[in-house]
Image: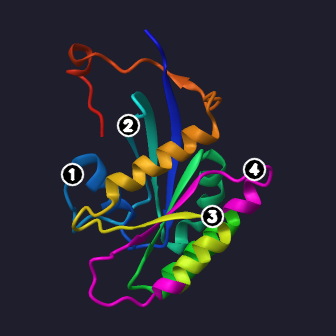
Amino acid sequence: MEEIETYTLVILGSGAVGKTSITIQLIQGRFSAYHDPTFENTYTKYVNIGGDEIKLNILDTAGQDDFECMRDTYIRQGHGFLLVFALNDMQSFDKMIEIYRRIKEIKDSYTPPVLICANKCDFPTWEVNKENFIDFCESQKLKYNFTSALTGENIVKSFEDISKMMRKQNPDSNYGKSKPKPSKDEDANCCRI
């Protein structure tokens, strides 16, 4: 049985921008309005990319300033990054730019795959100017999606896009392989979040 390509995807951004809600929308297909602030959660998701199945280890990180000291560790672990900010929160946009710059500093030898999620696009008013956001992304050659964890808009697309980016950047999958995905019978006694 062939081993599965495995990538660590780190989700970073300020607190309360929707990182956990985006992840739950992907994993469970529902919006979670209420949950405790995240310290760190890890999820596993199998994604089909170009007919091949890959395994994503998704690291949902804390956004609160109290946990900022952990950010560099998360960045070192990551093969790809979803950077999330809330369109109704200008400070979260500024923080996302700061995090992106920190990724570039830490991953000095190469630029890892990064996709920006402009979340809460369902809100009627935005603090972040759309043109300024797009200009920033274009100036840094970053891909982006306007997302809504509430409605599910572009959530699956964002994870598919970043998965393709990680795979394209590393066609030989030097990130490592994991054990084969368990069969349905073997999987019956497993709990996968």
Residue 147 x %, y %: 35, 67
Q: Which residue is mark 3?
A: 69
Give me the C-alpha separation between circle 1 and circle 4: 34 Å
Query: What residue is rendered at 44% in x and 59% in y?
Result: 39
Residue 66 x %, y %: 53, 71
Question: Are discs 3 and 4 less than 8 Å apart at CB?
Answer: no
Residue 106 x %, y %: 74, 57
The tag earlier along the polypeptide, 1 or 4, is: 1
Question: Are discs 2 and 4 less than 8 Å apart at CB?
Answer: no
- Circle 3: residue type: Cys
Is 130 inside the magenta-drawn segment? yes
Foreground: disc 2 or disc 1 = 2
Give me the C-alpha separation between circle 3 and circle 2: 31 Å
Left or right: 111 in relation to 31: right
Q: Which residue is mark 4?
A: 110
Residue interval drawn in magenta: 103-131
Question: Is 54 situated above or below 129?
Answer: above
Left or right: 118 in relation to 151: right
Q: Which residue is mark 2?
A: 47
Q: Quadrant of residue 171?
A: top right
Under circle 4, the secondary element is: loop
- Circle 4: residue type: Tyr
Give me the C-alpha separation between circle 1 and circle 3: 31 Å
Disc 4 residue crowd, few under 14, some 14–19, many 20+, Cα 10 Å: few
Q: Which residue is mark 1?
A: 29
- Quadrant location, the C terminus: top left
Query: What residue is rendered at 53% in x and 37% in y?
Result: 7
Is 120 inside the magenta-drawn segment? yes
Left or right: 49 in relation to 70: left
